[in-house]
Amino acid sequence: MVKRNYSFEKRQKELAKKKKKEEKLQRKQERKDGDVLESDEETTDTQTDGLPREES
């Protein structure tokens, strides 16, 4: 009968959790960067006096 290697299983589980956490942080960062870009676009749509541009 084969003896189970619990330390290997534990290490694999820890690596999976770490990878998932890093992916989640990356998604949050991308979402945060996207929000910043959207707010920058809104500010470029206004003139320097704060009034919206008239489109022709």
Image (tube, grey):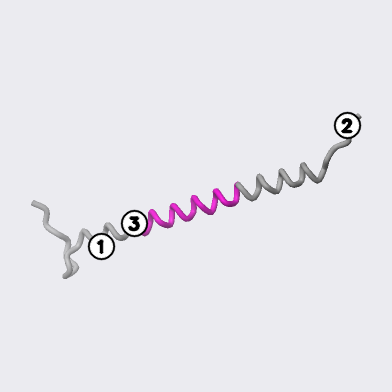
Mark 1: which amino acid?
Thr
Viewer-closest of 7 and 37: 7
Q: Which residues are magenta?
A: 20-36
Q: In the picture shown, does residue 42 fall above or below 4? A: below
Task: Report how far apart the C-alphas of labels 1 and 3 lie in the structure.
Answer: 10 Å
Mark 2: which amino acid?
Val
**Residues marked 3 and 2 touching at CB (< 8 Å):** no
Q: Which mark is residue 2?
A: 2
Lower position in the chain sequence, tag 1 or tag 3: 3
Q: Which residue is mark 3?
A: 37
Of helix, strand and loop, which one carries label 3? helix
Report the residue at 51% width, 52% height from top: 26
Q: Is residue 18 left or right of residue 51?
A: right
Q: Residue furthest right?
A: 1
Q: In what quadrant of the picture does the N terminus appear?
A: top right
Please identify the dominant SS of the magenta region: helix
Report the residue at 66% width, 45% height from top: 16
Report the residue at 30% width, 60% height from top: 40
**Residues marked 2 and 1 touching at CB (< 8 Å):** no
Q: Which residue is mark 1?
A: 43
Mark 3: which amino acid?
Leu
Task: Report how far apart the C-alphas of labels 3 and 2 lie in the structure.
Answer: 56 Å
